[in-house]
Image (cartoon, rainbow, N blue to C red):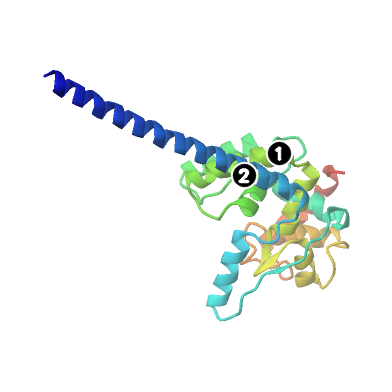
Amino acid sequence: MAIKRTTKNNRKRKVKKKQNKILWWIGRILLGLIAFSLLWVIALRFINPPITYLMIKRGFEWQSKGKGFKVDKTWLPYEDLSDNLKKAALAGEDAFFMTHHGFDTKAIEQALKRNQSGDALRGGSTISQQVAKNVFLWPARSWFRKGLETYFTVLIELFWSKKRILEVYLNVIEMGQGVYGAEAASHYYYGKSGKSLSRKEAALIIAILPNPRKWDARRPSAYVNRRANSIVRYLNHYKIPE
């Protein structure tokens, strides 16, 4: 009996030792991932992201239709971006951008109520959340991806300035079929630089962002035009990062 108990205890110790080793490795991996994500976020505070997962995905979708791999983008520094476009982004996409810390709780509550009521799914994403999703993650609807989006949103709000967040947003966001960022969109729609967009031109570009592959800033639908006019009306109500 004593031998059996000893053998059983030895097995338990071996199992516990193995479990501890697994937990040790899981902890090491998690710490490594956290360290990598911190370095990634801090690096992109100073380095412009060269490409995003969405750009690659859309490029292959475009190619599969026999139209070639299209990723049209040109980085435009914050100082050169039209102030009209910066204000339009806040007016149309994130009214409390300058005061929130990454999340608009009222917009999230409204989105949850709308989604629970069975209406078409809509998010309550801020500009910060959209940057986190576009730069660091992939387009998908899942709680796991949403959790990562929350994590990266906290990090960019912590390590980046509002100016940097808005600069990255206006340079990576999808603004048309294979078109990304303000400079590429300005040339695509108006044949001019993103430095000199008029109030209405800037508002139209922002107005199509909910569905940039379907809507066109050059030929706006009645809905898009109404949305753009509303953005123009409130343009001067918004303060932008300096």
Q: Distance between the residues labelled 2 and 1?
A: 14 Å
Q: Which label sits on residue 167? A: none
Q: Is mark 1 on a helix, strand or loop?
A: helix
Q: Name the residue under label 2.
A: 37
- Residue 196's place in the image compared with 141, above or below, is below
Q: Nearer the viewer, residue 88 or 200?
A: 88
Q: Which label sits on residue 157? A: 1
* Residue 164 visible in image: yes
Disc 2 or 1, which lies upstream in sequence?
Answer: 2
Q: Residue furthest bottom?
A: 66
Instruction: Residue at 61% x, 75% y: name it.
Output: 69
Q: Is mark 2 on a helix, strand or loop?
A: helix
Type of amino acid under label 1: Glu
Type of amino acid under label 2: Ser
Instruction: Residue at 79% x, 64% y: name it.
Output: 183
Instruction: Residue at 72% x, 61% y: name it.
Output: 225
Assess whether mark 1 and mark 2 are in contact (beta carbons under 8 angstroms). no
Q: From the viewer's perspective, is 218 left or right of 67?
A: right
Neighbour tally class for label 2: few under 14, some 14-19, many 20 plus, Cα within 10 Å: some
Q: Which residue lies furthest to the top in this view?
A: 2
**Hey, which quadrant is residue 56 in on the image?**
bottom right
**Hey, which quadrant is residue 219 in on the image?**
bottom right
